[in-house]
Amino acid sequence: MVNELMKELGLDETPDNEALISSLVADAQLITLDSISSTATQDDYKNNNLFNRAVKTLATQLFYDRTLSEGTSLGYQMIVTHLQMGVLSSADTNATSNENI
């Protein structure tokens, strides 16, 4: 994901850029994961394209504005909401399945 984001940002592949983007991606992963669910793990989302786009979106925002002085973008918020709904839908499905037992 780091190399993809560096290409999207048009950054040269230098050790400094790689270290910075790696750090921002790691932070964005943790923030996004925590925003979706307190029980979710990175393994739950490692192959989820929507999660990966949310991480890249937030990491990009952090690249340009480390303090997120304007908050997170509406696009990021929309993606997180979709991911949250997926978690809630799964929880509802599991609860319904357990009720039928």
Image: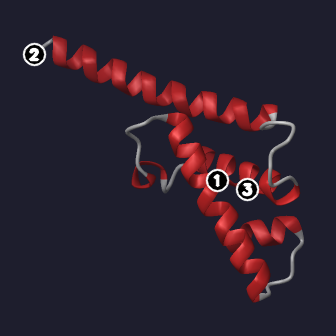
**Where residue 32 appears, x then y in whole percent?**
59, 44
Which residue is at a point 85% across and 41% down the rendered structure image? 69
Type of amino acid under label 1 = Ala
Q: Which class describes the residues within 10 Å of circle 1: few (<14), some (14-19), or many (20+)? A: many
**Where residue 26 appears, x then y in whole percent?**
59, 62
The answer to whether the residue labelled 2 contacts the one labelled 1, judged by CB atoms less than 8 Å apart, is no
Q: Which mark is residue 28?
A: 1
Task: List the residue tagged with mark 3.
Answer: 59
Q: Estimate the spatial distance between the alpha carbons at disc 2 and disc 1, rounded to whole Å.
A: 39 Å
Which residue is at a point 73% across and 49% down the rendered structure image? 58
Q: Residue 25 occupies which quadrant of the picture? A: bottom right
Between 91 and 47, the one lying in front of the other is 91
**Where residue 44 appears, x then y in whole percent?**
41, 48
Task: List the residue tagged with mark 2.
Answer: 101
- Label 1 residue SS: helix
Give the side of residue 94 with respect to residue 47, left or right.
left
- Mark closest to the chain's N terminus, 2 or 3: 3
- Mark closest to the chain's N terminus, 3 or 1: 1
Type of amino acid under label 2 = Ile
**Where residue 68 appears, x then y in whole percent?**
81, 45
Between 14 and 90, the one lying in front of the other is 14
User: Do we see residue 1 in this rendering?
Assistant: no
- Label 2 residue SS: loop
